[in-house]
Structures are given as structure tokens and as C-alpha cells.
Amino acid sequence: MGRYNITYPTTLVLHAIAEGVRYGFDIADRTGLQTGTVYPALRRLDTLGFVRSNWESEKVARREQRPARRYYEITASGTSALETAMKRFENLGRLTSRPRHA
Amino acid sequence: MRSLLRRFIACVARLTPAWARREFQAEWDAELETAWAPAAGRSWRDRASVAARALGSIPDAWFLIRQQWSLDMLMQDIRYALRLMRQRVGYTAVVIVTLALGIGANTAMFSAIHAVLVRPLPFKEPDRLVMIWENDRLNRKPRYAVAPANFDDWRTQTHVFEQIAAYLAQSGSITGAGEPFHATVAAVSANFFDTLGVTPALGRPLTPADGVPPNHRVLVLSDAAWRTHFGGDPNVVERTVQLGGMPYRIVAVMPVGFAFPDRTIDIWRPFPFRPDLLAIRAQHFLTVIGRFKRSASLEQARIDVESIAVAAQKKYPQTNEQRGTTMVPLQEAIVGEVRSPMYLLGAAVGLLLLIACANVANLMLVQGSSRVREMAVRAALGADRFRIARQLLIEGTLLALVSGAAGVALAAAGTRALTRLAVDYVPRITDVRLDPAVLAFALAVSLVTGVFFAFAPALRASRSNVQRDLREGSRGAIGSGRWLRNALVVSEVAAAVVLVTAAALLLESFWRVLQVRPGFATTEVLTVETESSEKYQQDAQNRQFYTDLLARLSAVPGVHAAGVVNNLPLSGQGWTAWLTIENRPRPLGEPPEVGYRVATPGYLSAMQIPLLQGRWISDGDTADSIKVIAVNKALADQFFPSGNAVGSRVRLGPNPKAPWRTIVGVIGNVHHAGPEVEPAPEAFEPFTQDSFGDLTLVVRAEGDRAAIATAVRSVARTVDPSVVLWRMQWMDGILDDHLAPRRLSLLLVEGFAVLALGLALLGIYGVMSFAVSERVPEIGIRMALGAAPAEIHQMVIRDGLRLAIPGLVTGAALALVVARLARNMLFEVSPGDPIAFATVAIGVLGVALIACYVPARRAARVDPLTAIRVE
């Protein structure tokens, strides 16, 4: 991937996915961001190839009595992009602390 | 509540691009559903927070929409379009050439209209400048030259004008500055340049003191005269030269591009308005301009000057009773005459562009039909209609931009040619530039064109039915586009008919102008302007020079006759004077005005003007013999309807003590102002019995033109080496020049009409051959069922005429409207002239038949067996 600078909220979203948060609304819960911020960030990460998305199997969904949801996973290039972004935002100090204490 | 959320998401989903829509909806539904389940039994606050989350779908959708328009995707479309253009070189070339012609013609015409009609005059605050004429109600001449006393009234009594200036055209030879040259001079009031708000590039502006004799002997040079005759010498100011034999000091050089009253002016000089001159109220020879105050409006300015004129009507009824004023903004006064021809040409090129667009749109539709399957495949692979339509729009825009660039190149060449052709007839045409405004126009036209002709196929593509198109390929979509193609051809034919009709009407007008007998010979007549030598202080000496010259010229082999006149036909110059008839009560107020010229005995036969009654001026009419005058038929008919003109006595001019002149003969009417202008009453005096200005030599001679010209020149030099000869022209050349503006607009419209007709022919041909090729199976069946080839042939022709005839009818109706609007460009041809319309109808139908012939023959040759097997 070329040099793409991702914004602070997008980094938050990517970080949440890296930590294993899979669904859009759950990412919103974890990061404290609005859904209207989370989703465009997800689209952008997807276009950049930093995350990939997939649909759960119907079976899992039916077992939990809900529709199949789309889940997101971080890719290899996403992991390295996250590292770069973390370094970039390091000085701000709050990046790593906030999700951990959430 | 849940279903409400669902419906909301469905609504938002509709905004998203088709390729993302299904997943968008599924994802948001699933997330909301999951979030709702635990919230269901709880407080309204929890439920509201879930609902609030649904609002996030809007930024999400907006992101997807933006992505659709992202540069990446746009580039992809552009690359695809470029690849297509390379693949279809022939088609692309036809499109680009057609559009480039349309865009080029429009850009050229726009740049001319912009430079001449639209762009403000290059003077300070030009919207406050006006031209003021006398309105001669008696002779129905609303733009009449101004008498000095009236000019003086206006400028001293006005409350609304800052400045009122006057000028008149003169000419004279400049000596004492290298090669002597004949200069066109504007004699101006000292505030002339101040009124316009221009300052010289070199030297000092004129001051009021320059208008007061003897300080008036100063000159201002035009940039062109300065460069041509003074080598652009920066020290030219303060040099002294001779104008008409008198010393003048050069005080200034005007900046390049300053060309008022027109671009022929070499020199401006202050006109000495002496008190006796400013008292003249019966002679009208000034042109007046004014600058009204910033606080005033044009209407106030008009009322101001008109009220001064009304006061003068009461005060000086002898001279002013019928004289009002006419005021026109200066720009309108300068370019008003060319406005309607230029707009007509602008409309013509506009129509041409429409035709070009219709043709290209049709080409695209036909191409589009062969691309139906391609589009269907793309749609099946996930491209939404919008994306496909956009692809077509991008193709169209790219083509149009390339054509636009080619068009601008054509326009650059076109305006250069146009400027060269029109430089003498169209004011300000030398200001034509391909400036940012023109380029912006070309870009706008190209883009609108691109959208216009891509629109039809795009519309089709967005409506298409993927399943059917995949199944049936190009065949399936054929019928659906037919009405559009036909409509395009019909409008194309209509537009072409308008242009061709305009061309026919102009051509007929021109032909009728050529049929007018001007009343004088145009071939074998050489004319030379002369400027009498400075050393002839007395008229008698001057007359002796011309008498000697004419006598010697008559002896030159090949010369049949030679004469002199003070104002040549078609020269735009002419004098007028009050006509008083002996023993007839003078009408109230101003007497009628007639034209008059001063001539020699040889003039009549040199110009071959017929003598109708009595005699012409003869050698026996001398300064001492009784005063005589010859009149033209128009004067005799108007003032002596009983035919008793010869022998009656008249007086010319305002002086009631002037001697009576006996009318000795009546001659044929001469169209002095041009073949298209009805001759006015006119009189001729012998040059021995009146004063005259500069004279024009008229020599009737047969043989080699160059040799005759040389002979005339050398004879003049032998009589007097110091004589200044200039503007040596043959009469037919003068007539040609006079007709040139009419011929120029005729040629341009004619050219556009031919192009339009050619394009319409291509349009009909294209649609008909496509219609035949799509109907091959049907034709095959018809033939198998017993239709004769001749019947098929007729059927195709009939179909073609079904397109041509509605186009013809619509076009003729439009043409009638256009012709009525442009009526003043026609001469002795009514806007609804049946001959022109019939010719156009026959011509256009003929073209339609030619266009249908090839497709019809192809249809008639269809082999039923092969045709049916294709099915």
C-alpha cells in the first residue's frame, strides 16, 4: 500500500478492529464514535485494503436469533498501517489508553 | 418502530450506487435489528439512542455516493473512452471534424460579435458617450449633419453634458516629412480628446487654446501614420510639417488602437471655430459627440438637447423649424449598422452547430445500438444505469473537448480571414482576439455540445432492459430509438431549410441589386482623386489647370472622354443645398433640399449618363456667361411634374441675392448612394460657375488598364508636376467595393447553407441506411411474399420523404419568421418570396431523394433467402 495517512477517528476504528471488535455498531460502542463516523471510516479502510469484510453464515445468525451481520477483520497491510498511524499519533498520548480503559 | 427504521434504511439505500445498495441495506438492517433486540423492552431513551444510530446511515450513503464520483472511477471511464476512440478511428474522425466545424464557426462568430458589438469602446467610461445628430423631419433624415450654430447652442446651453465636441472629415497632403503623402484628416473641436477621455501616447493633449486662431496650426498623429510616415521617430513632437501648404506643428501621437471616427484617420487637427463660422445655421457638416454627466441618464441627456432644439425651432424658424435631434449611444452609432448582419450570421452558425450536433447524436445513437450488448454486459456485471449513462456522457464530453480544441484552431484561422475580408466594412473588426472570453465561450459550447449529443444515447442506456438486451443484442433495441433518430433528422432538415432559405433570399437580393442600372457606366471608367496644387491661389488658375489636363487627356490614344466632378458616385460624399424656384411661393420654414454636384462638359459622356432633354453643361458656360444648371430626372419629376423644367430658373443655397440659374437640360438618374438606394433630386453646375472642393478626374478609356493609368499619371505630371494624385480606381472596382459588405454576408451565409445542406444529406443518408439495414429481415419477408424490388425501392424513398417533408415545412415556417426579422437586409425581395421558398423546397427534396437513393437501391437488392436465413 502506498502512503496513505489515515485520520485520528479512522485510526481509532482500525485499532478497535485490530483488538477483535468485529461489527460496525460494536466498533461505535468501543470507540465512542457516532455510527455516521464509523461507517465512512470502515468504507475508507476497506478501499485502502486495511480491513476486509465478510458476512456471517446464516447458521450462526439463526442460532443467535438475529439477522446475519457483516464483520470486519484487519489485514496484514492494515496492521502495518495501524503501527505507522499509532506512531504518528503517539505524541497525543490518548490513543492507546482510551480503548483499553473503556 | 422497527419497521419504521427498516423503511428509513430502505429509503437511504435508494440513494446509494447500485453496486453497493444491497449490502448497504443488509448491513444496516442487521446492525439495527441486533441493537434493537435488547433495547426492545427498555426505556424510550434506549430505544431513541438506537434510532439515533440509524441516522449514521446518511453519512455512510453520502460517502458511497462520493466514492462513485471519485477521481479513480472518473479516470477509469476516461481511459475507457480514449480506448474506444482509438478503436473507432473513422467514426471518431467524422465526429470531431463535424463538431470542430460547428464549434469553430461559432467561436469565430462569437469573437467577432464580442469584439465589435459587445466589448465597450476603448474610451473612458464609454457608456456616458453619445452621438448627436439633427433630426431633419422635412427630408425625413433622422441622422443629419449638424450646423455649427446648432452645435454651439447645444454646448453652451446644456445642463446635462460635461463636454460636447464636434468634428468633420477632411483630407490633405502632408509635405516636409520625407515622402509626401495624402492624409485623411479629422478636424476636431479642441475638447474632442477630452470628451472621449483619451490621452496621447506621446506629446501633450490638445487644450482649448489650440482651437483659437492663429494657434490652431497644430497636428496630432495617429499611431499608424507616425510609424508609416515618420518611422516611429520618438522626437516627432514639435516637428513642423506642411498640411495643404501651411505649416503645422506636431504636438502629439495617439496610442495604438485609437481609431475614432474610424481607422482611416491619419491626423487630427483642431478646427478653428471662428465666430462667423459658429453663426452658420443653414449649412450642416459637423458630427457631434457628447459626454453627459455621471449624475445624468441617457434619457435626461436626450431631453436636454431636444429642448434646446425646440427653443431654436421657435427662435430661427427659417432654418430650424423642422429640426429636432437624434441621440444614440456612441457604441450604437459606430456599430449599429453591422448589428443585424452580425446577429444574422451568429444565428446562422448557431443553426449550423445544432445541425452538427444532431448529426453526431444520430451517429452516436446508431453506434449506441451496436453497443447495446456491451452496455447490457456491463450492467449485468454490476454497473448501474447511472454509471453507464455517465460513461456515455464522458465519451461525449471528451469528443467535444477534442473537437473544441480543433474548433478553436479553426476559429483562429477563420477570424484572421474574416478580419482581412471585413476590415473596410465592419468597424472595430481589427479588435477581434481569441481572448479569455472567447475561449470560455468555446469551452462552454463544447461542453454543452458534448452533453447534448451524448444525452440521447445516455437516456436510452439508462432506460434499457438488461435481460432483453443480452438476449436480443442490437436487434432488440432498434425500434426503441427510432423516434429519437427521426426527430433529430427532422429538426436537422428544418435547421438546414432555414439556412438555405436565408441564403436564397440574400442571393436573390444580391441578384436584384446587380440588376439595378446605376445610371452610369461602370466599365472602362478610370477615376483619380486630385488635390489641386497649393500654388493656385485663385480659382481661375485652378480651373485652367483642369482645363489643360482634360484637353491633353482627350488626346491620349484610347481615351474617349474625360471630365471632372467634385463628388464621385458611390464615394459617400455629396453636397446639398436649398432649392428655390422662381415665381413659386416659398414654402413655410425651410425650403426643400436637393443634392448638387459641380462638373465639366466631359463628365456626362465619360460616365455615359444619358441626356433626356435640353443640353448638358458646355464649354460655352463660362464664369461670365449666364448661370446655368442641369437637373436629374428625379428633380424634374418632383418639382416640374408638367415637364417644364428646361427653361425654368432656380436658385441653390440660402443666399436670397444669389443669381438665378437657368435649367438647360435634364439627365438620367444616377444612383449616387448605391444601386439599392433610390436616386434623389439632384442638380449639376458647371465648374466654371461655382467653387468646388477637391475634384475627381473621370476618364473613359479602352485598352490595357495599367497602360491607361500610367498615361493619365504622366499627362497630369506634364501639366503640373506638383499635382497630388491619389486613390486611382476603376469604376467597376468602386462598385465592387460598394457591394462588398453585402457580398461578404451573402458568401458567409451561402457557405453555411451549403455546409448545412451537406450535413442534412449525411443525416438523412445515415438514418435511412441504418433503417434499411435493421429492416433487412422484414424486407426479405415482404419480397418472399411477392413485393417487387421497385415497390421496396419506393417504400424506402417514401420513408425518407416522411422525414424530409415535416422538416421542410417546419423549416420554411421558421425561415419566414427569420426573414421577417432580417427584412432590412433584403432588397426588393419580400421575406416570403415564393421563388426563393419554392427553390429551397425543390432543392431540399432533391437532396433528400439523393440521400435516400443509395439505401433504397440496397433495400431493393435484398435477397429474400439470405435475409430470412439471418433471422
Image (cartoon, helix red, strand yellow):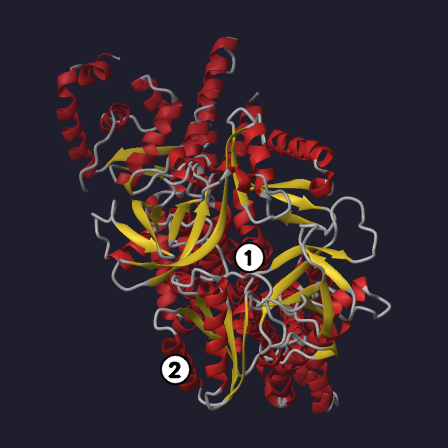
Q: Nearer the viewer, mark 2 or mark 1?
A: 2
Residue assigned mark 1: B342
Q: CA distance from mark 2 to mark 1?
A: 41 Å
Q: Quadrant of the N terminus of chain A?
A: top left
Point out residue B155 in the picture as x, y percentages from the top left corner.
55, 32
Quadrant of the drawing holding the C terminus of chain A: top left
Q: Chain of mark 2?
A: B
Pick the front one: B298 or B488? B298
B653 relative to B195, above or below = below
Secondary structure state at the residue bearing disc 2: helix
Mark 2 or 1, nearer chain start: 1
Label 1 crowd (10 A; few <14 / some 14-19 / many >=20): some
Q: Position of residue B290 (x, y in %)?
A: 52, 36
Q: At x 73% / y 43%, what residue is drawn?
A: B322
- Tag 2: Cα neighbours inside 10 Å, few (<14), some, or many (≥20)? few
Q: Amino acid at mark 2?
A: Thr
Label 1 element class: helix
Q: Which labelled disc corresponds to residue B802?
A: none
Q: Quadrant of residue B816?
A: bottom right
Q: How many marks?
A: 2
Query: Which percent across, then down, holds residue B751?
Result: 54, 71
Q: Is residue B509 left or right of residue B4?
A: right
Residue at point 22%, 28% (across, down): A18
Q: Nearer the viewer, residue B133 or B575?
A: B575
| Residue B184 relative to residue B512: left or right | left
On screen, residue B861 above or below A84: below
Where does label 2 land, which residue? B710
- The relative height of residue B700 versus residue B235 in the rendered view (above or below) is below
Please check whether the numbered discs 2 and 1 fall on a single chain: yes
Q: Position of residue A52 (x, y in %)?
A: 29, 38
> Looking at the image, can residue B444 be seen?
no
